[in-house]
Amino acid sequence: MEIMSFEEVITYLHKKSRPYSLLMGNGFSMAYDNEIFSYNALYNFLTSRDDQLINKLFDVIKTKNFELVMQQLDTTLALLKAFGSDDKLQSDIILASKKLKDGLLSSIHKLHPEHVYKIPEKKIIACAEFLNLFIKSGGHVFSTNYDMLLYWTLMRKHVENAIDGFGREIENLDEVLRGETAEYSDLVWGPNIENQNIHYLHGALHIFDSGVDIEKEQYDQSNFLLEKIKKRLDRGSYPIFVTAGNGDEKLSHIRHNRYLSHCFDKLSSVDGSLITFGFNFGEYDEHIIEAINKATHAQNKTPPKLWSVYIGVYSDNDAEHIRSIQSKFHAKVKIFDAKTVNVWGV
């Protein structure tokens, strides 16, 4: 299997006049900084502090999913209160929940740039140009990363027609119809869902499930994003992200959340060609391969359908791995040198 350059891939697909979409894995973030964006960095950083209580929580519940652990603690506390358990046990649960939330925030603060404007301008410009290649072709951008680099890039530099599905809804429509001033909701997922082309397949730290709406956190003039995330955690609202588990466990988590399920279904029906960057198709990514194969065989989309997958590789070992699993893909598979992609301008 010949190894192409990224430019050769884009040139070839441009001539085909078909949309091409992007699937990004952790290599996208590691290309920005491979020290702070290693896989499962939040979990590893948190457990490396040797906090016995936090480590015990993850061990007992047998998950690396922060959202699940925090929700189970809240449920346990509610049950204890309902059945009138002793105050000491309830206090222990409250302490465990607080330590986990504080630990999560410490991990985010440690592993992320302080805010979007800490990212050098030239890196943001280069990344925006990279993303524009796919959006302008009519394609989609899919990310399995839970960090905020993609969000920050889209927020800081205009990527034309990049739509993440979030928007504000008028909350007092009857009053507006009578001529009164409109009052708008927080940024909620749904108003722009029909045109959505930015998809966080495993969630992200700025996306929250309030129990009623899926909400997106944003900066304002008084608070940085990390401060606003802390306020949400204190209110019992948790970021949506899938951080661990095998393919079946990840898919189960995805199917139990309407936002994640929608994004997964979009990948399962993507058209044209799919280019992957920083995604190694490891043993826990079978659900992603399943989605790609569904797109290849979409019964109601022939044509259009997914014709080909171009997978970025960094090394000979990476290339050999893709060759060894090539038969799992139902679409045509080609590989390209990921080092020829100038995502962050370096």
Image (cartoon, rainbow, N blue to C red):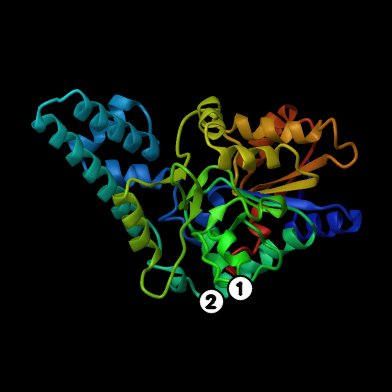
Q: Is residue 125 left or right of residue 92?
A: right
- Which residue is nearer to you in this view: 56 or 342? 56
Q: Quadrant of the C terminus?
A: bottom right
Horizontally, is 240 left or right of 27 in the view?
left
Image quarter in which the N terminus is found: top right
Label 1 sits on what residue type? Ile
Residue at 19% over, 34% down: 93
Label 1 neighbour load within 10 Å: few <14, some 14-19, many 20+ = some
Residue 196: x, y in percent? 68, 53
Nearer to the camera, 58 or 171: 171
Q: To which residue does mark 2 refer? A: 121
Amino acid of disc 2:
Glu
**Which numbered tag is attached to residue 125?**
1
Q: Residues within 10 Å of mark 2 (few under 14, many from 20)?
A: some
Please provide percent x and percent y for residue 223. Answer: 36, 69
Label 2 sits on a secondary structure element that is helix
Q: Are marks 1 and 2 in contact (CB under 8 Å)?
A: yes
Query: What is the x, y in percent for residue 340?
Result: 68, 59
| Residue for point 66% across, 59% down | 163
Inspect this view and state whether residue 298 appears: yes
Disc 1 and disc 2: Cα gap in Å? Answer: 6 Å
Location of residue 69 in the rendering, given as x and y in whole percent from the top left corner = 33, 34
- Left or right, residue 2 beside residue 39: right
Q: Residue at x 32, y 26 (%)?
A: 61
Q: In the figure, 188 relative to 60: above or below?
A: below
- Look at the numbered disc 1 and give the secondary structure of its residue: helix
